[in-house]
C-alpha cells in the first residue's frame, strides 16, 4: 500500500536559516506528491505539488522536486521567516479515475525564532 | 475562492452521546473527505464520498458513519462518542488533485 515517511519534528531554526524537511514515499503506480501547511488554529492549505518525476513544485519561496529514483520529495526554503512557523505535511495520491485520495505523513512542526 | 466550512471549531461532548459534525463546501465539488488528526499520527482518513448518497470507508471507519444527502454537505456522525474519539476532525473537498480543507473541529469527549 501507499505510505509517506517524513522527518520527525519538531524543527527549530533561526530566521533566515536554510530549511529542509525530508519526505520519502512508497506507492504503487505513479503518484502525485504534495506538501500541505497548517498554520496555528487553521486547517490545511496546499503549499505545492508535483505530478510527475523531475517536476519541481514551488510556492512562497518553498520548493520540492519529485525524485523518482530516490522516491523522495524534500521540502526546501532558502531563508525562512517567523511567519513560516507551522506544521508541514507531505502527502501523495495515486491515480484512481478522478477518485484519488491522499495518504499523509505524520507532519513536521517547524518553529522559526526571530 | 473555494470555501469549506465546518459547523463548530470546538465541541465538548459526553461519552455515549451522538455527535454530528457538519461540513459544507461551496464549489460544487463531487469528492468530500473526513479525516482525524492526532499528534504523531498525521491525518487519517475516516470516510469519503464521491457523489451524493455515495460513501466509502477510509482507513479508520470504526465508530463513525457519514451522510451525504446533498452535494455540498458531508456529515460525520459518532453514533456513541467515546473518549478515544477526542481529536481534531478535518473535512476536505476536492477537485481532481487539489484538496481544500476546512478549519477543523476540535472535539473533546469527556
Image: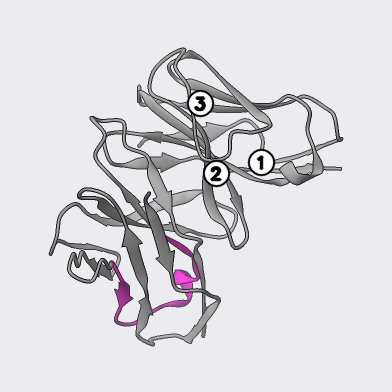
* Residue A91 vertical placement versus A6 (above, below): above
Q: Is residue B27 left or right of residue B72?
A: left
Query: Does the magenta run of residues contain A106?
Result: no
Q: In this view, does B82 lie to the left or right of B38?
A: right
The alpha-carbon separation of the residues under discs 1 and 3 comes to 14 Å
Query: Does the magenta run of residues contain A89?
Result: yes
Residue at 40% over, 56% down: A3
Residue at 43% over, 14% down: B52
* Residue B109 vertical placement versus A114 (above, below): above
Could you say where residue A88 lies in the image, as x and y percent from the top left?
45, 64
- Label 2: chain letter: B
Q: On the image, numbered disc 3 is attached to which residue?
A: B24
Q: On the image, numbered disc 2 is attached to which residue?
A: B103
Circle 1 residues within 10 Å: few <14, some 14–19, many ≥20 = some
- Label 1: chain letter: B
Residue at 17% over, 69% down: A69
**Tag 1–tag 2 contact (CB < 8 Å):** yes
Identify the image quadrant of the C terminus of chain B: top right
Circle 3 residues within 10 Å: few <14, some 14–19, many ≥20 = many
Which of the two discs, 1 and 2, labels the residue nearer the N terminus? 1
Give the extent of the magenta segment.
A73-90
Identify the image quadrant of the N terminus of chain B: top left
Residue at 50% over, 71% down: A85
Q: Is residue B30 left or right of residue B86?
A: left
Could you say where residue A46 lies in the image, as x and y percent from the top left?
36, 52
Secondary structure type for disc 3:
strand
Q: Say yes or no: labels 1 and 3 on the same chain.
A: yes
The alpha-carbon separation of the residues under discs 3 and 2 comes to 12 Å
Could you say where residue A89 lies in the image, as x and y percent from the top left?
44, 60
Q: On the image, numbered disc 1 is attached to which residue?
A: B9
Amino acid at each position: 500500500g501507499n505510505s509517506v515517511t517524513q522527518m520527525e519534528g519538531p524543527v527549530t531554526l533561526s530566521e533566515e536559516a536554510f530549511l529542509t524537511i525530508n519526505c520519502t514515499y512508497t506507492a504503487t503506480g505513479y503518484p502525485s506528491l504534495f506538501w500541505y501547511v497548517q498554520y496555528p488554529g487553521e486547517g490545511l492549505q496546499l503549499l505545492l505539488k508535483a505530478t510527475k518525476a523531475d517536476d519541481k513544485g514551488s510556492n512562497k519561496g518553498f520548493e520540492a522536486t519529485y525524485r523518482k529514483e530516490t522516491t523522495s520529495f524534500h521540502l526546501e526554503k532558502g531563508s525562512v521567516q517567523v511567519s513560516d512557523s507551522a506544521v508541514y505535511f507531505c502527502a501523495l495520491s495515486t491515480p484512481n479515475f478522478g477518485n484519488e485520495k491522499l495518504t499523509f505523513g505524520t507532519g513536521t512542526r517547524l518553529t522559526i525564532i526571530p | 475562492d473555494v470555501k469549506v466550512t465546518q459547523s463548530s471549531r470546538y465541541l465538548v461532548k459526553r461519552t455515549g452521546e451522538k455527535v454530528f459534525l457538519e461540513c459544507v463546501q461551496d464549489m460544487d465539488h463531487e469528492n468530500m473527505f473526513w479525516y482525524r488528526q492526532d499528534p504523531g499520527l498525521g491525518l487519517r482518513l475516516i470516510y469519503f464520498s464521491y457523489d451524493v448518497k455515495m460513501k466509502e470507508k477510509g482507513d479508520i471507519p470504526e465508530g463513525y458513519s457519514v451522510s451525504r444527502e446533498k452535494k455540498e454537505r458531508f456529515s460525520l456522525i459518532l453514533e456513541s462518542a467515546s473518549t478515544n474519539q477526542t481529536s481534531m476532525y478535518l473535512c476536505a473537498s476536492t477537485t481532481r488533485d487539489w484538496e481544500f480543507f476546512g478549519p477543523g473541529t476540535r472535539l473533546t469527549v469527556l
